[in-house]
């Protein structure tokens, strides 16, 4: 008796080789390409991570430098200059805030217009995110589809007689003529 009759089909057909023992992280991003510009994926991740850390460090150094500059100006009694700079920042941020408030207001009006008149008062107090989630969940709009019959090939009008056409037109319209007799 053969033992393979009791084995599962997977075990019988298991002809896969064990995985390579190479370090996958050290392989190049594109296998089989001997381009000298290829960078191993692990090295790529390392560079991206260090780049992110450097950007964070740069931002913190800029913030520290700005704080030191303001502190020096306070010690020197330059309060008017500090006040002017801070007022300019406030004006810029107020302008940006007004822009985003206006965008949110338009989005909110669009969302509320999708609701029936009775529900606008009820759901008008919800935050924009909650209102959007509510509308997405409850008022899904279907995409209009064309419900007409499918057209296959050429369409020969009913008033045209195939036998009165020229031979070239007969060849062109032959499939349309045959389609008139197909069941639908």
Image (cartoon, helix red, strand yellow):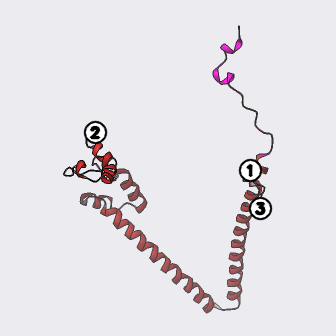
Where residue 23 appears, x then y in whole percent? 79, 45
Q: Nearer the viewer, mark 1 or mark 2?
A: 2
Residue 182: mark in rendering: 2
Disc 1 to disc 2, how far (Cα)?
Answer: 54 Å
Q: Earlier in the sequence, mark 3 or mark 2?
A: 3
Cα distance in 3D space between marks 3 and 1: 13 Å
Residue at 21% x, 52% y: name it: 160
Q: Is residue 123 above or below residue 4?
A: below
Residue 158 image point, x, y percent: 20, 49
Residue 130 can be seen, yes or no: yes
Q: How many marks?
A: 3
Residue 37: assigned label: 3
Work out which quarter of the rendered image holds the C terminus and state it.
top left
Mark 3 Cα-neighbour bin, 10 Å: few <14, some 14–19, many ≥20:
few
For the residues marked 3 and 2, what is the alpha-carbon distance in whole angstroms? 61 Å
Q: Which residue is mark 1?
A: 31
Let me know if residue 123 is in the magenta part.
Answer: no
Q: Is residue 38 above or below residue 54?
A: above
Q: Position of residue 111 (x, y in %)?
A: 35, 62
SS at circle 3:
loop
Res 181 → quadrant? top left
Q: Residues within 10 Å of mark 1 (few under 14, many from 20)?
A: few
Residue at image point 75% right, 61% down: 47
Task: Residue 50: give x, y in percent of width and height.
Answer: 75, 63
Helix, strand or loop status at disc 2: loop
Which label's residue is closer to the chain start, 3 or 1? 1
**Relative horizontal placement of residue 168, taking residue 19 as reference (left or right):** left
Q: Which residues are magenta?
A: 1-23
| Residue for point 68% across, 72% down | 59
Residue 112 shows which numbered tag? none
């Amino acid at each position: 008796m053969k033992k393979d009759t009791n084995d599962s089909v997977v075990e019988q057909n298991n002809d896969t080789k064990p995985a390579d023992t190479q370090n996958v992280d050290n392989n190049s991003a594109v296998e089989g390409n001997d381009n000298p510009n290829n960078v191993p994926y692990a090295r790529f991740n390392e560079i991206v991570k260090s780049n992110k850390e450097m950007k964070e460090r740069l931002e913190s150094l800029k913030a520290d430098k700005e704080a030191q500059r303001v502190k020096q100006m306070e010690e020197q009694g330059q309060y008017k200059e500090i006040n002017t700079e801070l007022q300019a920042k406030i004006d810029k941020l107020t302008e940006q805030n007004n822009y985003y408030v206006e965008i949110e207001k338009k989005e909110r009006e669009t969302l509320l217009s999708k609701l029936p008149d009775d529900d606008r008062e009820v759901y008008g107090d919800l935050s924009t995110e909650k209102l959007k989630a509510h509308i997405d969940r409850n008022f899904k709009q279907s995409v209009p589809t064309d419900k007409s019959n499918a057209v296959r090939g050429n369409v020969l009008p009913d008033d045209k007689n195939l036998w009165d056409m020229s031979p070239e037109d007969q060849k062109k319209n032959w499939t349309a003529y045959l389609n008139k007799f197909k069941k639908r």
